[in-house]
Amino acid sequence: MTNATKYFIWLTLALGYSTSKCKALLSIYPNIADFYNGGVSEWRLSGVLSPKDITALESTPLSKAYEVIARCNELGISILSLDDPAYPEKLKGIYDPPAVLYLKGHMPDFSRHLGIAVVGTRNATAYGKMASHVLSGSLAKVGVVIISGGALGIDSISHNAALETGGVTVCVLGCGINFPYLMSNIMMRKAIAERGAVISEYPPDYPPGKFTFPERNRIISGLSDGVLVVEAGEKSGSLITARRALEQDRDVFAVMGNITSPYSQGTNALIKDGAVPVTDYTDIISYYPQFSLEGEPDNMVQEIPVHKADLDLDDEVKKVYLAVTAEPVHIDTVTESTGLPVRVVLQALTELELEGLIQADKGRMYRLI
C-alpha cells in the first residue's frame, strides 16, 4: 500500500468500478493527492469527469476510504493501487485497469512468468473436466501461472490442477474477498492464497451483482498473456473473457470439442474465428519463447483426445455427473446447479458411485474419480 492508496480507494467508491477514468486521471496527475486536494475547481479542469462524477466525489468523504483500509487490515487483506510498483504492468496497460486491487496471498511477477487464463462453463462435461485438468496441470507444472475466476466447473478444476502440481494460480473474484460467495470452494481459495493470490477490485465485503462478474473478466484476461477457453456454450460468459482478451491484444486459445455438444459451440466458433486450436499444452507455450519454463510435466497426460463419446447414462444421472468436479463438491451444490429434486440427486449419486465414476467423501461431499 502506498501513501496515495486512500485516494484511489476514494475514487473507486465515488466513480465506481470498471472505469477508465482513474487511469486517465493518473496520467494527468502523477501525484493523485494533488488532484484530491485541488477540490471541485481542479476536478472540473481535469476534462475527465462529468458533472455527475464531480457530485459523487463531493459527496464521498475520504473517511470512507479509511474505513475500507481498516477493514482490510482487520482481515489481513493487502491493497495494491495503480501507483504501486507491485501492481502488475500487464494489467496497468489495459484500457480500464482497476484503480485498486484487494489481495490475499502474493501477486506473482507476471513480467517473469507466463500467465495463461483458463476459463469455461460451470456445467462442464466429462470431456471438458478432463481437458481443463490436463492442460492446466501441465502448464502449471512447467511454471505457467494459471488465472481463472474461482467458479464451479472449468475454473475450479483449473485452479485445483495447478495446486495439485505444486504450481501457482490466481483467482479473480466477482465480489469482495470476504463475501461468503460459493462457500464450497473456500478451502480451494485458501490454498490458492498460499500458492498465489486471490484478488478482487471490490472492497472486502462487496456482494456480487449483475455486472460484477462480466467486469472482473477484463482483469482475468488483463493479467494474462493469453486466454484458453476449454468449453463454452454459444452464450457462455467465458466468451466475454475471450472478447476482452482480443480487445486487450491477448492471444486466444480454444480446446476443440464435440460438434454435437452445446458446450462446445462457443469454443468451436472461436476457432473458426481465428482462435488457436489446442490439443496439447505445447500448443500454448510455443507461442511464448521469451519465457523460461521449468521442465517437462512428466506426470501429466500431455495430450487430450479431440472427441470423447458421451457416457451412456440417463439424462438426470448425466446431469448430476456433470455437476461433480475433480475437487469435492457438496450435495447441496450439486442439487442447486442441476435444479433436480434432492431425492433424484441422491439416487443419481448412488448410481454414479456404484459405476465407479465418483467417490463419496465425508460431509456429504462427492468428487470425480
Image: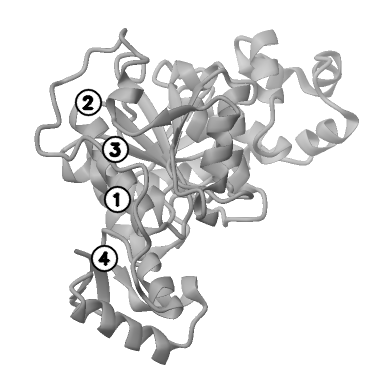
Q: Are marks 4 and 1 in contact (CB under 8 Å)?
A: no
Q: Quadrant of the N terminus?
A: top left
**Where, by quadrant of the figure, is residue 315 drawn?**
bottom left
Give, as a three-letter code, the residue at label 2. Answer: Gly
Work out how far the residue at label 4 is from the one at label 2, CA to CA, in angstroms: 25 Å
Q: Label 4: few (<14), some or many (≥20) within 10 Å?
A: many
Label whose residue precedes the other's in the sequence (1 or 2)? 1
| Element type at mark 3 | helix
Q: Which residue is mark 2?
A: 143
Q: Are marks 3 and 4 in contact (CB under 8 Å)?
A: no
Q: Which residue is mark 1?
A: 130
**Direction right: furthest residue:** 51
Q: Residue at x 44, y 45 (%)?
A: 257
**Considering depth in this image, is 342 or 202 the residue closer to the camera?**
342
Tell me where residue 128 appears, x and y as whole percent. 38, 51
Q: Are marks 3 and 1 in contact (CB under 8 Å)?
A: no
